[in-house]
Amino acid sequence: MVARLKPLASPRGCPDPASSGAIVLHMETWDAIRARRNVRRYEDRAIPKDDLDRILEAARRTPSSMNQQAWDFVVVKDRDRLQELAKAWRYAAHVAGSAATIALVVPTSEDRDERDTFQYDIGQVTMSIMLAAADRGIGSGHASVGDQALVRSILGLPDDRECAILVALGYPADRRLEPIAHPNRRVLDDVVHRERW
């Protein structure tokens, strides 16, 4: 599922960008979007360093409000530490069996607007991680954090930081990632309202 680069076709009536010497490439992401699903059971198999670094690079490149980049990422691969992290939330059991889990860390804040901004930005980071992982055939599953004190202790976070979310990664134990023809989602016309509700 490695992304493929293809020349971008010129719209009808527009000059061919290649004729001007410009190189225009189109990155295929559609397969990764259609293949990505929550994976909570993983093979006992390590993720190659290059693939993990690429996923982290995708996270680092994620846009953020006013380019604050108010985040840090803690990568955990140690099995004992993963098992402890899995106790941070009642629906985080899959973290224990992951090949790696990325803790998305943000500054603590009492300011509601700032917290909302951090949460939105972390949501974007989460999707960047998941799509980059899917592109490599690596499954992902996110988990909230209920016990901040536990996670702070496990990861050695400073007092002015908290873990917003955990993203577990690993190769799916049940079936490999492939584009899903008919996902369990509401139909487009039920979800999309054009111009007005």
Image (spheres, rainbow, N blue to C red):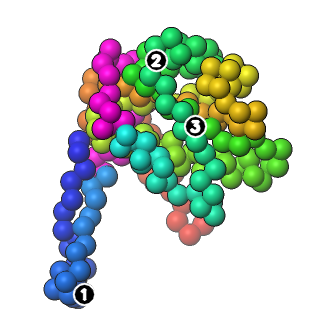
Q: Mark 1 points at which residue?
A: 14
Q: Does the magenta stretch include residue 102?
A: no
- Left or right, residue 161 beside residue 37: right
- Mark 1 vs 3: CB contact within 8 A: no
Mark 1: few/some/many CA within 10 Å (<14, 14-19, 20+) = few
Name the residue: 51% across, 17% down: 82
Labels 2, 1: front one = 2
Which region of the structure is painted magenta? 30-52
Tell me, yes or no, if residue 94 can be seen here: no
Q: Provide the secondary structure element on which disc 2 rests.
A: loop
Q: Name the residue under label 3.
A: 104
- Mark 3 vs 2: CB contact within 8 A: no
Tell me, yes or no, if residue 70 can be seen here: yes
Which label sits on residue 78? 2
Quadrant of the image containing the C terminus: bottom right
Name the residue: 37% across, 40% down: 53
N-terminal of the pair, mark 3 or mark 2, is 2
Labels 1, 3: front one = 3
Q: Find the distance from the CA under tag 3 to the CA under tag 2.
A: 17 Å
Name the residue: 22% across, 75% down: 23
Q: Find the distance from the CA under tag 1 to the CA under tag 3.
A: 43 Å
